[in-house]
Image: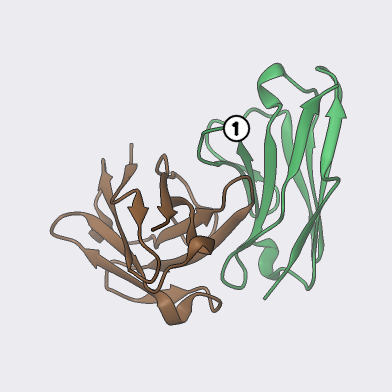
């Protein structure tokens, strides 16, 4: 099983700031089968990024994904009030596993 | 657009079988191209993949749950279902259905299943 470790656990930032979230895999994720999700309280996760760097339909371009192999990053260029949420990475190169999540909170 | 909706009992007794159904609207399960997934989230915790199924009936399960999980599909009703046997309190979670076997989207709203006597 591929284990995904997300860091930091919590990120305290102000609106307008840049957020950088990390996801590290215990082994290489084949073909960059890595996705990112946003989850707000009481809601289902929403797909943001797939294939490590492709934005899902309707996702603003302030969200970007990068990385390959075992190290991946989600960047939110300028935080909007609606971006404060929990973010999960997911690999789907070998079945599916999720990271433990990073909470982006208002500072 | 495709929408998914989970349904089933919100309370299950320990040792019994949890049964949920996901109804798909706005698109056909039989059209192919996608697997259909079950994912759960323990209260206040992260996400755990349970398994997925193709319209043909091919299934893949999380090895950690495989001995207790059965996922089936009913194309005539445009539904797929989850059965989890011998449940314990550790199976208390919000259960989601979703389209896809990788980058999953869309998801249902989720349904809370509590295991308690």
Check the image and report above or below for A31 versus A78: below
Q: Nearer the viewer, residue B31 or A97?
A: A97
Q: According to the image, label 1 marks what residue?
A: A40
Chain identifier matching the green colour in the rendered picture: A
In this picture, residue B36 sits left or right of residue B23: right
Q: Position of residue B84 (x, y in %)?
A: 38, 69
Image quadrant containing the C terminus of chain B: bottom left
Chain identifier matching the brown colour in the rendered picture: B
Q: Nearer the viewer, residue B90 or A33?
A: B90
Is residue B4 among what the camera can see? Answer: yes
Image quadrant containing the N terminus of chain B: top left
Residue sitting at 24 percent across and 52 percent down? B28
Q: Position of residue B51 (x, y in %)?
A: 45, 68
Q: Position of residue A95 (x, y in %)?
A: 56, 71
The quarter of the picture where residue A65 lies is top right
Residue sitting at 64 percent across and 52 percent down? B46
Q: Nearer the viewer, residue A92 or B12?
A: B12
The quarter of the picture where residue A29 lies is bottom right
In this picture, residue B73 sits left or right of residue A5: left
Is residue B98 among what the camera can see? Answer: no
Check the image and report above or below for A23 versus B66: above
């Amino acid at each position: 099983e591929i284990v995904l470790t997300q860091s930091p656990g919590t990120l305290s930032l102000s609106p307008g700031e840049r957020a950088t979230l990390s996801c590290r895999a215990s082994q290489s994720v084949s073909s960059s089968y890595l996705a990112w999700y946003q989850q707000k309280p009481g809601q289902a996760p929403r797909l943001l990024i797939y294939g490590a760097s492709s934005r899902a339909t309707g996702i603003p371009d302030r969200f970007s994904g990068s990385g390959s192999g075992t190290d991946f990053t989600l960047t939110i260029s300028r935080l909007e009030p609606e971006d404060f949420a929990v973010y999960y990475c997911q690999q789907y190169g070998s079945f599916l596993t999720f990271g433990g999540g990073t909470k982006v909170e208002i500072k | 657009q495709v929408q998914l909706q989970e349904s089933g009992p919100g309370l299950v007794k320990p040792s019994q079988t949890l049964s949920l159904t996901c109804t798909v609207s706005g698109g056909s399960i039989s059209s192919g191209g996608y697997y259909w997934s079950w994912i759960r989230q323990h209260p206040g915790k992260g996400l755990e993949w349970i398994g997925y199924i193709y319209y043909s009936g091919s299934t893949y399960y999380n090895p950690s749950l495989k001995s207790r999980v059965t996922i089936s599909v009913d194309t005539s009703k445009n539904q797929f279902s989850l059965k989890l046997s011998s449940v314990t309190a550790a199976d208390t979670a919000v259960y989601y259905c979703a389209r896809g076997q990788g980058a999953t989207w869309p998801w249902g709203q989720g349904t809370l299943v509590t295991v308690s006597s």
